[in-house]
Image (tube, rainbow, N blue to C red):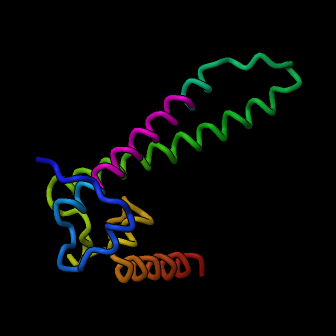
Amino acid sequence: MMPDVLSEKALVAMPERDYMNAAQLAFFRDLLLRLARECEQELAAARQALQTPPQSDPLDAAVDEETCRHQLRFLGRRQALLEKIRLALRRLNHGDYGYCEISGEPIGLRRLLARPTTEYCAEVKARLEANEKHYAHSRNG
């Protein structure tokens, strides 16, 4: 029997020892599936908009081209987000969801609520970003 899905408030009120229990996993599964559906709908609408030829005056061609560029960037970002959502669902199905991929430490409910697709705890993410910044600086220096 599937547990009832919690509210965010009830989720964060749970004791730490209940981290990633069945109810919390159900909450995040529901959230990720909903995000995936929304993302798929947005992708379909954006693709449809790109397939519809502009009915504008030839003088508006530059505006149409810029709009197309924006749509393509949007599609790329949404496609990347959808892939992250699918990876998060796979981690959830394998029992790894909610735990840092590098340290193995709990990511934390508040961080997961803010970014349900995150793979790293805050400490590891900060370290990775500092390394990226240092590497980018050393390449440009």
The quarter of the rendered structure image containing the C terminus is bottom right
In front: 32, or 60? 32
Give the residue drawn at x 26%, y 51%. Answer: 89
Residue 93 within the magenta-colored segment of the rendering: no
Give the residue drawn at x 38%, y 44%. Answer: 34
Give the residue drawn at x 81%, y 19%. Answer: 56
Q: Give the side of residue 128 with respect to residue 52, left or right.
A: left
On screen, residue 18 above or below 52: below
Residue range in magenta is: 28-45
Q: Give the side of residue 92 with respect to residue 129, left or right.
A: left
Q: Give the side of residue 125 with respect to residue 103, left or right.
A: right
Residue 104, quarter of the rendered image: bottom left
In front: 125, or 61? 125
Which secondary structure is most common in the magenta stretch? helix
On screen, residue 60 above or below 117: above
Q: Position of residue 79 (x, y in %)?
A: 45, 42
Residue 16, quarter of the rendered image: bottom left
User: Residue most toward the right?
Assistant: 59
In front: 127, or 119? 119
Q: Position of residue 58 (x, y in %)?
A: 85, 19
